[in-house]
Image: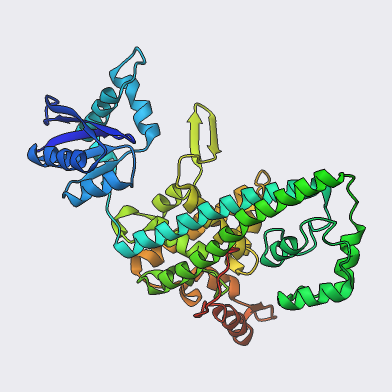
Amino acid sequence: MGSYAGVDWASEKHDVLIEDELGEELFAGSFAHDEAGLRSLCRALVRHDVQLVAIERPDGLLVERLLDAGLRVLALHPNQVAATRARFRAAGGKSDRFDAFVLCELARTDSHRFRVLEPDSDQTKALRALTRAREDLVQARTTLSNQLRAELERFWPGPIGLFSALDSPISLAFLKRYPSPKDARSLAAKRMQAFLASQHYSGGKQPSELVAKLRCAPDGRAGEQETDARRTIVLSLLAALLPIVAQIKTLERQITTALREHPDGEIFRSLFKGPDSVVTAATMLGEIGDCRARYPSGDALAGDAGQGAVAVESGKRKVACFRWACNKRLRDAFCTLADSTRHWHPWAQALYADALTRGHYDHPRATRSVGRAWCRVVWRCWQDRTPYDPARHRALQQRLTVIIPATAGPVLDHLATARMAAGLLATNPADSPKVSASQ
């Protein structure tokens, strides 16, 4: 029999405890988070023939080094570890070494209750890194855009709502050229037309309409010095916002290429109607991974994606509660899939309508109900390594069947059914260089 280890990780050092199968301590120590420390930590675990290593995170440099050393890793949720501390200490104390002991005991006595971490391929890790980096940049863009909006509302609200979005390229270019009402004082329809032509504007509004909309906004009463100061602030925010917008576009192009080259990429691209819907598909693939043993069933995937409710039962009381402990990125991706398909997919439309008619279901819960159903479909396609095919979706085909009432009994309208099926099959994604973050 091998031994078991618990690693309480931190940014500067890692506390390690190793026990045998009977719970006797074999080794306890602390290792610095540097190259020498990580090498010593892995050597100590291998030297003591560690069978399982428990740690409170599923990724990161330390986890990669443990897997690279040939060790089996149990990635435990912090809530599971926190709930177990009272099992070993009633006083409520806490220390890094005690947390390592708790992790080690969980690996020794409860390892059958947890899944061993299975590493993904290098392609999947790269795709996951790209999607998460894009998400971080989008959050930064939103923060700066909100700051820019608040600044404009203080002295020049005209550019807000002039174009589709304040952080759109044409809106940022307009503010860079006209950062204050003083700069736009001489702006007329002719100059607006030249600006729109330089930005390849396709919004459908005439230059005179945009100028009139700009002039209709309320005038600020800031003095000359305050206006100059706020003009400088707007330019500063633009200087920070423009590179982020450009880098988001660059990452989206890289995500598109990485998704097309991934062996499972077509599986997730086939779930969306538009050929340019790649961001959500790439997020789903990156977060689910390519290890088929990670999710033994569709319900397991639904639980990790936050689409399955948590049942709370006590006596005669039984309620379904929102699932907080889940993969937040995967939950957002499945909610996006469910919300987009309810507009065009007959099966998803019916599920959404049925959920709303149950009385207490609101839009978010109905969307998660559709998302839970999609989890089972995605899991089946993912396990079989087959793209989604509407013709093989039996529940969908029942919705596409057209029945004509007749005196002799209902008759199947084969022509109408074929037309409906052909219209849905035509929505399967095709290769396209575009990128959309909306689906």
Residue 383, image quadrant? bottom left
Q: Position of residue 168 (x, y in %)?
A: 68, 63
Q: Is residue 35 left or right of residue 355?
A: left
Work out which quarter of the rendered image holds the C terminus and state it.
Answer: bottom right
- Pick the front one: 297 or 161: 161
- Pick the front one: 311 or 388: 388
Counting labels gives 0
State whether residue 129 is above or below residue 358: below
State whether residue 80 is above or below residue 278: above
What residue is shown at x 12% (from left), y 37% (from top)?
A: 44
Q: Is residue 177 left or right of residue 304?
A: right
Q: Position of residue 291 (x, y in %)?
A: 30, 59
Is residue 164 in view? Answer: no
Q: Please identify the residue farthest to the front as the structure is shown.
A: 225
Q: Position of residue 163 (x, y in %)?
A: 76, 64
Q: Is residue 394 left or right of residue 125?
A: right
Q: Position of residue 60 (x, y in %)?
A: 33, 47
State whether residue 269 is above or below residue 222: below
- Pick the front one: 11 or 396: 11
Q: Is residue 217 left or right of residue 123?
A: right
- Pick the front one: 198 or 374: 198
